[in-house]
Image (cartoon, helix red, strand yellow):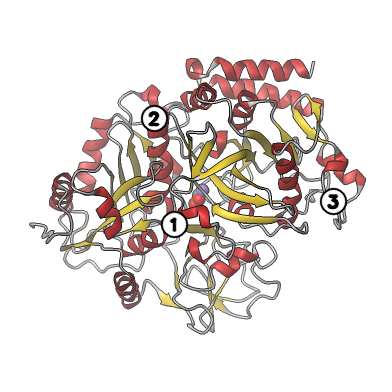
Amino acid sequence: MRVEFSGWTKHRLLMEWIQEIADLCTPKSVYLCDGSEEEYTELCELLVKDGVFTPLNPQKRPGSFWCASDPSDVARVEDRTFICSRLEKDAGPTNHWKDPEEMKAILDKLFQGCMEGRVMYVVPFSMGPYGSALGMLGVQITDSPYAVVNMAIMTRMGKKALEVLGENGSFIPGVHSVGMPLKVGIKDSVWPCSQTKYIVHFPEERSIWSYGSGYGGNALLGKKCLALRIASVKARDEGWLAEHMLIVGITNPEGEKHYFAAAFPSACGKTNLAMLTPAIAGWKVECVGDDIAWMKVGKDGRLYAINPENGFFGVASGTSMSSNLNAMKTIEKNTIFTNVGLTDDKDVWWEGMTKDKPSHLISWKRQDWTPESSEPAAHPNSRFTTPAKQCPIISPSMDDPQGVPISGIIFGGRRASLEPLVYEAFDWAHGTFLGASLSSEMTAAAKGVIGQLRHDPFAMLPFCGYNMGDYFAHWLSMENQTSKLPKIFHVNWFRKDEQGNFLWPGYGDNGRVLKWCFERVSHQIEADRSPIGWLPKLDDLDIDNLNISQETLTKLFTVDAHEWKKEIEELKKYFTLFKDHLPEGISLQLQALEKRFS
Ligand code: OXD
Ligand code: MN
């Protein structure tokens, strides 16, 4: 089939590539997206007609839809995610690798005719504000209209991106197929997907191929595939940082403002922190992004960050008016809900949303559900896809092509013990070591054993597009570019007592911790030196109107030498994984930590 471009683009390489993919995948037709509102509405109507989307009650949630995935396609598939660099050592020990030629042969077979009977959509998009020197352009080809409408929310998608691309601009190509060709006689399913899944990245040629899944990070290629795995490689080559981090602006009662970026593993509360309503009076938080930050040293020597995305793909389960009021307000309209419960009055519900449970609903498995049901109404990794602009505290700087200057970087994990509520790194190299040492209990965001502790350096374990040891070295090397790098902090909201109760209330009260970080970056307060870093003087942590005992506070900040020595042994073992790719700077930090405990 000859693809008719009719002036959609004059970019010769783009047209040749689209034709090549159409020839390989043999769809019944090709649709070139323009990103208009009419197009979004028409695609949603198509998804409704096909039974994929159920429109929600317009009185309750205008412009919104419910849908449920195949029960086998509910999360990112890390074990099917590949970094196919030419050399295995460049993918490193934390990524799955296959020789690029071998992988291309596999993909060639899989993609041959894979879109038969389906429409092939071509989705041009910009990651980051149009024309930002920090931004990047991508084009996703997909046979999933669900992926198209999600991309329309999550990225700056359509004509304008094509204009910026012009006739010879560069773009990251991504091909996505649900992997279920509609051969004659085969009936489509509401959530087509395949048991065979491949999420593949070619870091040298900077391309993405995704097969078999329609869900989230597997299918919305702008997000994890482009903005983290491919972008991290580009960032290494060009001397900047592509990170799994939220970005917030914080203003104190005196009107002073600082921006922070924070890395937490998936489903550890990044969206909640990004949209925080601080429990302390007079402090204001603005959200620039909830998942990804691209950061580059600016002319003034400071690190500037943009959020490459344009929407939130947040975890619905557990989100409530008390855990994240701003997220609840963001999703009041124009939102796609995937794998939550559908109530009888055509609204949505999930575990943790309200204390009172609906007496009946349709669960994410499309089954009748009552509070007595043994299975949850929503999948723990259920999601909302919603425009960032709808967030009541969205920062006007989100669209600033310059980005925002970052004063502090925060690392955090889910640790029941060991890690104090908050501490500060001695310097950049020590902060890099804190990022490299991050461990967290696993959540439902990826397939795996929930609750199991795993190393997740920089919260980038599933997202680093090259050798993680080289990535540590890249972080260390940022110091060669400037002396004005941000301060680095480590937080842990999840420490528990002997009975298994959380010691810290979390959510809005995390604003108290942000306040401490703010006052450290603005040099307003001193801190106490400890073997692991700078700890707050307890009087400096604002606990006004917080019902917390001195004993609990002490436990939150306990640095138990015995536990830390065990952690050091564990880290020694872990870092051997990186062999000669482990930079000396990290080994020296580990040795120094050990020495401080001896
Ligand atoms: C996400 C993730 O979807 O980290 O953001 O899994
Ligand atoms: Mn994420």
Q: Nearer the viewer, residue 383 or 399?
A: 399
Mark identifier at residue 543: 3
Residue type (three-letter) at the residue carrying disc 1: Asn
Mark identifier at residue 238: 2
Structural distance between the alpha carbons of marks 3 and 1: 35 Å
The residue drawn where x is 55% and y is 64% is 391
The C terminus - image quarter:
top right
* Secondary structure type for disc 1: loop
Among numbered discs 3 and 1, the one appearing first in the sequence: 1
- Residue 181 in picture, x, y percent from top left: 23, 59
The reply to whether residue 250 is in sight is: yes
The residue drawn where x is 58% and y is 51% is 267
- Residue 128 in picture, x, y percent from top left: 41, 49
Mark identifier at residue 310: 1
Residue type (three-letter) at the residue carrying disc 3: Ile
* Callout 1 crowding tier (Cα within 10 Å): few <14, some 14–19, many ≥20: many
Q: Nearer the viewer, residue 390 or 257?
A: 257
Residue 374's place in the image compared with 256, above or below, is below
Q: Nearer the viewer, residue 421 or 73?
A: 421
Residue 392's place in the image compared with 232, above or below, is below
Task: Answer yes or no: disc 1 within 8 Å of ligand 1.
Answer: no
* Callout 2 crowding tier (Cα within 10 Å): few <14, some 14–19, many ≥20: few
